[in-house]
Image: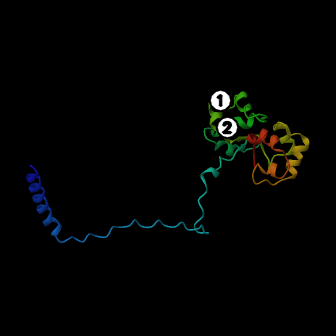
Amino acid sequence: MIRSFRLIAALLGLLAVPALAQTPQTAAPPTRPAPAAKPTPPTASTPAAAPAASVAAPKRIDINTASEKQLDEMPGVGPVRAKAIIAGRPYTDPNDIVTKKVLTAALFGKIRDRVALANINTSTAAEMEKTLRGIGDVRSKAIVAGRPYATPTDLVTKGILNQGIYDGIKDQITY
């Protein structure tokens, strides 16, 4: 029995020898992946991409002073509703546009993030005092005196309003 195992092992060994004796083929060197392109710093001709988080929401429109054309351009409003918005002025709460039956609740829900009650760069102190809760005579005059504003948060950074008061009106103003 041991002899037959040796014989089989010897035969297998002889079969392997010719395979080893063959001339090796030269294989193509392994290819390396192309190096990744290095990002180039932005220049005047190649501006840096804006981060996704900085994409701003659409600018709000002051429904108390906007023109018919500005209102007409809001999604779903159109010329007839734009005239109705103007006829229903003044609005002291964004929801007044629904309670006064100018827009349906469904349509207002679609444009709520585009509606403001006052423009901090153009509304008068009296308009802001009347339409913005918590903004009395002194604060509304301070807002007018602090113009111009690049963004609504300038009201806080310029010291016109404290953060709490700003948080109470930030969804009701535009600039």
Which badge, 1 or 2, is on the more N-terminal residue? 1
Category of crowding for the residue at label 2, using alpha-carbon neighbours closer than 10 angstroms: few (below 14), some (14–19), many (at least 20): some
Tell me: residue 168, above or below residue 59: above
Q: What secondary structure is marked by label 2?
A: helix
Q: Outermost residue, front direction?
A: 2
- Amino acid type indicated by mark 2: Arg
Residue 6 x, y percent position in the rendering: 11, 55
* Number of dots carrying numbers: 2
- Amino acid type indicated by mark 1: Ala
Tell me: residue 69, above or below residue 92: below
In percent of the image, x 11 and y 51: which residue is there?
Answer: 2
Which mark identifies residue 112?
2
Which mark identifies residue 105?
1
Foreground pick, 60 / 34:
34
Q: Is residue 37 left or right of residue 42?
A: left
Q: Would you identify the image quadrant in which residue 98 lies?
A: top right
Residue 104 seen in this snapshot: no
Category of crowding for the residue at label 1, using alpha-carbon neighbours closer than 10 angstroms: few (below 14), some (14–19), many (at least 20): some
Residue 69 x, y percent position in the rendering: 67, 45
In percent of the image, x 62 and y 50: which residue is there?
Answer: 53
Q: Is residue 55 left or right of residue 97?
A: left
Residue 116 x, y percent position in the rendering: 73, 41
In percent of the image, x 81 and y 37: which residue is there?
Answer: 131
Foreground pick, 171 / 158:
158
CA–CA distance between discs 1 and 2?
Answer: 10 Å
Residue 15 x, y percent position in the rendering: 11, 61
Foreground pick, 58 / 101:
58
In percent of the image, x 71 and y 32: which residue is there?
Answer: 97
Tell me: residue 36, above or below residue 92: below
Q: What secondary structure is marked by label 1?
A: helix
